[in-house]
Amino acid sequence: MAALWRLGKGVSIEEIGEKRYIFIFFHSVDVNRVLDYGPWLFDKNMIALRAIKPRDIPLKVLLDTVELWVHVHNVTYSHDNLGTARRIGNYLGEFVRWDDTQFGGKWESYMRVRVRMNVTKPLKVETILMNGKGEGYWVAFKYEKLPSLCFCCGVIGHVEKYCLLYEKGDQALTRPYSSWL
């Protein structure tokens, strides 16, 4: 991981439990870079990172959220603003920030929003926004650096053959998710 992160001052890594590690960075610039540029993947699995506070017990820190960049497609030019980005971000999870340089360029036509999302819940694929005339229109979500995703339940971290919905043998099972996410 240290090589992937391209750290300036380095990191010490200590295993503290099953699938639990503490990363001790030697410079705050490195910490900020790792936290700001994630999510990070290892062997196609997402790594949930959290800054630990002095009173935290590392083995009890919840690792159920990650920050993801989400592309919001089909947004009208009039909705390219912080207010819309914040509403969409909070609909998906918890709004963190938006990339106000992304939308409306010659090559790209989507809004880019950074969202803290609960990885134990299904991803959302679309929603309706209202235009100035009170008419609704659909926008679709596409996620950057998405690791393994179950096409049955939409939860990050496992694939269809390990899904509880799939294992139940439900014949009416639909697959509302696909690789376009």
Image (cartoon, rainbow, N blue to C red):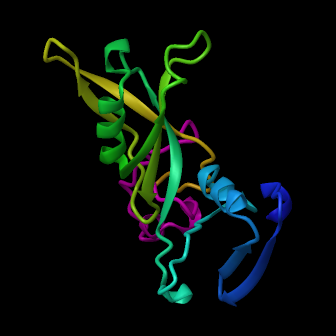
Residue at image location 49% in from the left, 23% down from the top: 110
In this rendered view, identify the residue nearer to me: 163 or 125. Answer: 125
- In this image, 109 relative to 106: left or right? left
* The N terminus - image quarter: bottom right
Q: The magenta stretch spans which residues?
A: 154-181
- Image coordinates of residue 60 in percent, x first then y, are 48, 87
Q: Is residue 114 above or below residue 99?
A: below
Which quadrant holds residue 102? top right
Q: Is residue 122 above or below residue 48?
A: above
Residue at image location 51% in from the left, 17% down from the top: 109
Residue at image location 57% in from the left, 18% down from the top: 108
Number of labelled discs?
0
Residue 71: say if magenta: no
In this rendered view, identify the residue nearer to me: 125 or 78. Answer: 78
- Image coordinates of residue 163 in percent, x first then y, are 50, 66
- Image coordinates of residue 122 in percent, x first then y, are 40, 56
Q: Dominant secondary structure of the magenta stretch? A: loop
- Image coordinates of residue 34 in percent, x first then y, are 67, 57
Residue at image location 15% in from the left, 11% down from the top: 133
Q: Is residue 115 above or below residue 22?
A: above
* Residue positioned most to the left: 134
Q: Is residue 153 visible?
A: no
In this rendered view, identify the residue nearer to me: 77 or 56. Answer: 56
In this rendered view, identify the residue nearer to me: 13 or 128. Answer: 13
Q: Is residue 162 visible?
A: yes
Which quadrant holds residue 29? bottom right
Residue 171: say if magenta: yes
